[in-house]
C-alpha cells in the first residue's frame, strides 16, 4: 500500500468526509504500526519544511507574532514525530493466566475520530490530537476553527497528503457543521479543544448516542504570589502569563492573587512592566503585543473590563482600546478586583491581569481553587512547603511552580470541572484513542 496520497487535500462535505474515513478505517487499522509511524514522520517533515509559510499564514489570520507563529508550527512537527515513536508502544499487556492458557490485553482503535480544534493556537492543538488518533489506527475527520480557517486547512493538508486516501479528511464550516459531525453515528470518538460551551454540548451529544469524548475547554488560570517573593520577577511572570498572544491562550494567566505583604511592590513593578509591552507590526522583532483575533473577541474584553471598573476596580495601566487599525486592546492591570466580578470568574481571553489582594498564602490558594474551571494554575513561592501545599490542594490539571509557561515534553493531565474531560495530550492520550480488549485462549477441550 502506498502511504502517500498524491492528490492535494480538499475540504469535503461532512457526510462525505465521514463516509470516506469510515471506508478507509478497515484498511488503516490493519496497516502495520511502523508504516503508520512512517506516514506521520513524512507529515512532520512536510510541516517542518513549510514552517515559514505556516507562520506567515497564522500571523496574517490571527495577528500572532511571527516568531511565535513559527515556533508553534515547529511544535506541531515535533508532536507528529513524538506520536510516531510513541505509537510503536501502544498500551497492552500479558496477563498471568492458568496452565494451558494464554491471556493478554490488546489495544484497538475506536474507528472514525472527529478532531475539532481552536483558532488561538491551531497548529499544536491539531497536530497532537490528529497524530495520536492516526498512529493508533483510527481515521480522522478534522474541522479546524472557522476563525483561523486558512492556517488550519494548510496544516491539515500537509498531514493528509502523507496519508492514504480517506485516512484523514478535512471539513470547513462553523459550529453547525461541527455539530453535524459530532452527531454522526459513524464517529466513535470526538476530540475537542475549544470553548467550554462547545465542549459541554459535545459531551451531551456524545453521551446521548454512546460515543466517547475527550475535551479540553476553557480555563480561568490563577497565579498566586507568596510572601517574600521578589517583586520585579513576579511582575515579569504575571505580564508574560497575561499578555503573551494578547492573553489568547488556554493557559494564560487570567486572575492574580497577591499576598498583602508584597502587593504594593508587585503592583508598582507590574505597572512599569505592562507599559513596556509594545503593540505593532507582528513581523517586527520589536513587537511584543499582538492584536486580538477579531472584533467579537475585543467586545468580550471590553465588556469584562468595563463591568469591573463599574463595580469598583481601577485600571492601574490600560483599560482601553488602542488607537490602531483593527481589534487592539492595551495591556491592562486591574486592581481592587473581587471574586464576584466577571473578569475574575469567566474567560476574558485578552491582555488583562485582574488583581485581588489576599491576606495569606492559604487565602490565595483558596481563591485560586474557586470557580468553575480547573485547567492550570501557577504559584510563585520560595517556600518548598508552600509549593507542595499548592501541588496537593489545587484541583487543576497542571500546577506550575515559579514559571508561568514551560514543562517537559510528554506530560499528561486531566482538566478538572468545567475545563474538560480526558487526557488531551501526552502519552496517555494514546490510551484515550484506543479501546482495550481482554483475550483468553486455551487449547480447548478436545
Image (cartoon, helix red, strand yellow):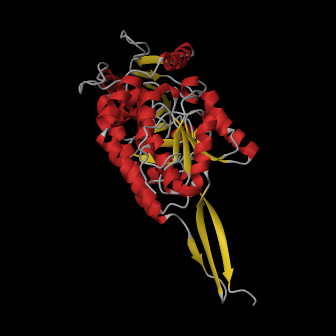
Towards the viewer: 195 or 393:
195
Q: Is residue 179 above or below residue 304?
A: below
Residue at the (40%, 13%) spot, across then down: 326
Please tell me how many numbered marks the rendered image carries.
0
Towards the viewer: 166 or 236:
166
x then y, percent, for residue 418: 62, 39
x then y, percent, for residue 434: 59, 58
* 218 sits left or right of 157 in the view: right
Q: Quadrant of residue 84?
A: bottom left
Towards the viewer: 147 or 264:
147
Q: Quadrant of residue 37?
A: bottom left
Q: Where the C terminus falls, by quadrant?
A: bottom right
Residue 164 appears in the rendering: yes
* 88 sits left or right of 210 in the view: left
Residue at the (40%, 24%) spot, across then down: 61
Q: Is residue 30 above or below residue 150?
A: below
x then y, percent, for residue 211: 69, 48
Residue at the (43%, 21%) spot, across then down: 292
* 359 sits left or right of 407 in the view: right
Towards the viewer: 419 or 444:
444
Q: Quadrant of residue 19?
A: top right
x then y, percent, for residue 2: 43, 54
Q: Is residue 20 above or below residue 40?
A: above
Residue 406 appears in the rendering: no
Amino acid at each position: 500500500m502506498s502511504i502517500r496520497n498524491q492528490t492535494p487535500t480538499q475540504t469535503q462535505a461532512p457526510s462525505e468526509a465521514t463516509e470516506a474515513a469510515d471506508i478507509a478505517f478497515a484498511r488503516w487499522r490493519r496497516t502495520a504500526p511502523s508504516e503508520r509511524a512512517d506516514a506521520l514522520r513524512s507529515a512532520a517533515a512536510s510541516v517542518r519544511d513549510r514552517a515559514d509559510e505556516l507562520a506567515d499564514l497564522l500571523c496574517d489570520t490571527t495577528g500572532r507574532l511571527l516568531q511565535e507563529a513559527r515556533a508553534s508550527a515547529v511544535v506541531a512537527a515535533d508532536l507528529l514525530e513524538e506520536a510516531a515513536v510513541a505509537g510503536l508502544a501502544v498500551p497492552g499487556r500479558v496477563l498471568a493466566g492458568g496452565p494451558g492458557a494464554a491471556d493478554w490485553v490488546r489495544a484497538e482503535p475506536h474507528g472514525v475520530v472527529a478532531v475539532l480544534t481552536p483558532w488561538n493556537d491551531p497548529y499544536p492543538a491539531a497536530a497532537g490530537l490528529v497524530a495520536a488518533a492516526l498512529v493508533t489506527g483510527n481515521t480522522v475527520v478534522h474541522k479546524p476553527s472557522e476563525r483561523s480557517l486558512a492556517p488550519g486547512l494548510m496544516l491539515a493538508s500537509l498531514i493528509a497528503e502523507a496519508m492514504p486516501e480517506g485516512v484523514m479528511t478535512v471539513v470547513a464550516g462553523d459550529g453547525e457543521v461541527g455539530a453535524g459531525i459530532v452527531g454522526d453515528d459513524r464517529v466513535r470518538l470526538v476530540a475537542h479543544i475549544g470553548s467550554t460551551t462547545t465542549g459541554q454540548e459535545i459531551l451531551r451529544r456524545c453521551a446521548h448516542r454512546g460515543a466517547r469524548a475527550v475535551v479540553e475547554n476553557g480555563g480561568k488560570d490563577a497565579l498566586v504570589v507568596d510572601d517574600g517573593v521578589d517583586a520585579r520577577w513576579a511582575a515579569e511572570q504575571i505580564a508574560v502569563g497575561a499578555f503573551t498572544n494578547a492573553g489568547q491562550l488556554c493557559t494564560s494567566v487570567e486572575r492574580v492573587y497577591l499576598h498583602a505583604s508584597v502587593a504594593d511592590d508587585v503592583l508598582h513593578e507590574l505597572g512599569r512592566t505592562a507599559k513596556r509591552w509594545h503593540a505593532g507590526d507582528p513581523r517586527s522583532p520589536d513587537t511584543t503585543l499582538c492584536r486580538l483575533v477579531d472584533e467579537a473577541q475585543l467586545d468580550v474584553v471590553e465588556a469584562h473590563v468595563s463591568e469591573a471598573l463599574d463595580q469598583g476596580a481601577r485600571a492601574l495601566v490600560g483599560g482601553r482600546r488602542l488607537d490602531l487599525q483593527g481589534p487592539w486592546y492595551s495591556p491592562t492591570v486591574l486592581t481592587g478586583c473581587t471574586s464576584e466580578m466577571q473578569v475574575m470568574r469567566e474567560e476574558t481571553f485578552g491582555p488583562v491581569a485582574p488583581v485581588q489582594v489576599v491576606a495569606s498564602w492559604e487565602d490565595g490558594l483558596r481563591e485560586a481553587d474557586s470557580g468553575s474551571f480547573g485547567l492550570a494554575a501557577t504559584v510563585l513561592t520560595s517556600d518548598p512547603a508552600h509549593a507542595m501545599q499548592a501541588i496537593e490542594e489545587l484541583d487543576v490539571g497542571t500546577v506550575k511552580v515559579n514559571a508561568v509557561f514551560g514543562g517537559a515534553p510528554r506530560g499528561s493531565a486531566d482538566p478538572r470541572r468545567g475545563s474538560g474531560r480526558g487526557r488531551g495530550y501526552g502519552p496517555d492520550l494514546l490510551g484515550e484513542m484506543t479501546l482495550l480488549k481482554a483475550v483468553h485462549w486455551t487449547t480447548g477441550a478436545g
